[in-house]
Amino acid sequence: MNAMPLAERMRPSKLEELIGQDHLSSPKSFLYRAIKAGNVPSLILWGPPGVGKTTIANIIANEVKAPFYTLSAVSAGVKDIREVIEKARFQQGVVLFIDEIHRFNKSQQDALLGAVEKGVIRLIGATTENPSFEVNAALLSRCQVFTLNALGKAELEKMIQQALSNDAALKKLRVDLRETDALLRISGGDGRKLLNLLEIVLEGIGEDPVVVTDEKVMAIAQQKVALYDKSGEQHYDIISAFIKSIRGSDPNAAVYWLARMIEGGEDVKFIARRLIILASEDIGNANPNALLLATNCFQAVNVIGYPEARIILSQCVTYLASSPKSNASYLAINQAQSLVRQQGDLPVPLHLRNAPTKLMKDLNYGKEYKYSHDYENNFISQEYMPDELKNAKLYDPGANPRENELRRHLQKLWGKKYGY
């Protein structure tokens, strides 16, 4: 198989070559004229997966001949944005392309605002979500939004025919394309997925001539693609189903979605990282061993790798799914952070402050603090919250055997103070 995927080899280099987006590629369109004039504004490209958003960004990079930077909102943070902006201050007309910009949070989008407003960078954001809901209003107001259409059957079949006619590797094959329904159905209107699936199918059939039927496509797709695209939207749908199955205590569904990800070539570390987060967020103190197992699972799969890592992942997944659940710790930190944002930086009570100097001691830092281990059962009742938050209960143990035990212990210590 060619080292570069078919979809990448067939990516248009000119706007006129773009399939299915005539309203943008026509010489009369604003975008066409802006690209040809080299005066592209900041813009948001909104449309389904695999319809040409990244292609348009690459075309702009080629046509405008400007410094071009690319970030993915899945992996980039504020630090990466600021690094590009800093470089842009010493260059002219910098274009920054951000794929899946809807996955940037408010602070990350805010980091772009000043540079876009002052013209330090020209932003191109690609999103599958409605930018009116997913992009900050201030940033959105400084960008033009272009909507890309979903690809229909005619456009997708045209992409197949172009690939068979124009790609050097495929032109060497004698292809008898008898049926396309399965190719179109599995790709789900995603042009990138369609072309890469076509290449896998042609190689998988391995005949001369290569006779393509729906039955053969389905058999090869199930075996080699597992109907999973780790770079597309289905990636997020399947990891969502996976997490929700574990949270819902269904080990059967959980291990099925795990298999879908493994067969689709998902990064083993990505799966293991999500299990660590889930073990704390959804199980927590209902079963503290869950976090230990998930952490050890992450370390183990890093050492072992595929294919044996699948066994370790399966052990961890089935254990987590079968474990009692509690999100009490998760809710506690959410409430605590909300209080901090509402109340600001409340002063630390004097008796809890450190007193390394004489002056601090003279100011009563640490005075009247009671050392817990000096008292019976290693406990003495005293106030640990700022004065404004006395008696505020943030952690409410869940209703499960282990946390009920914690609740009884806290009730014994604190009596009615926190209402346990």
Image: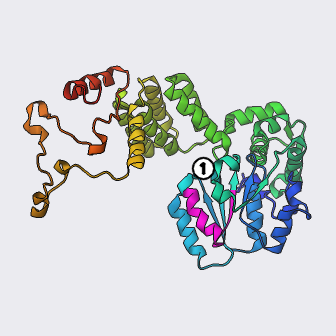
Picture coordinates of residue 45, whole percent (x, y): 74, 55
In this rendering, the answer to whether 161 lies above or below 125 is above
> Along the horizontal axis of the image, is 232 left or right of 242?
right
Residue drawn at point x = 68 percent, y = 57 percent: 140
In this rendering, the answer to whether 55 lies above or below 304 is below
> How many dots with numbers?
1
**Disc 1 crowd, CA 10 A, few/some/many (<14, 14-19, 20+):** some
Q: Is residue 326 visible?
A: yes
Q: Which residue is mark 1?
A: 103
Residue 119 falls within the magenta-colored stretch: yes
Indicate the colouring scheme: rainbow
Residue 71 falls within the magenta-colored stretch: no
Q: Is residue 259 visible?
A: no
> Along the horizontal axis of the image, is 200 left or right of 271?
right
**Foreground residue among 265 and 275:** 275
In this rendering, the answer to whether 143 lies above or below 390 is below
Picture coordinates of residue 301, whole percent (x, y): 45, 41
In this rendering, the answer to whether 211 lies above or below 147 is above
Picture coordinates of residue 264, whole percent (x, y): 63, 39
> Along the horizontal axis of the image, is 392 left or right of 106?
left
Which residues make up the magenta segment?
Answer: 108-125
Furthest toward the front, the residue is 388
Residue drawn at point x = 44 percent, y = 28 percent: 320
Task: Classify mark 1: helix, strand or loop.
Answer: helix
**Foreground residue among 212 and 143:** 143
**Foreground residue among 142 and 83:** 142
> Along the horizontal axis of the image, is 386 left or right of 187?
left
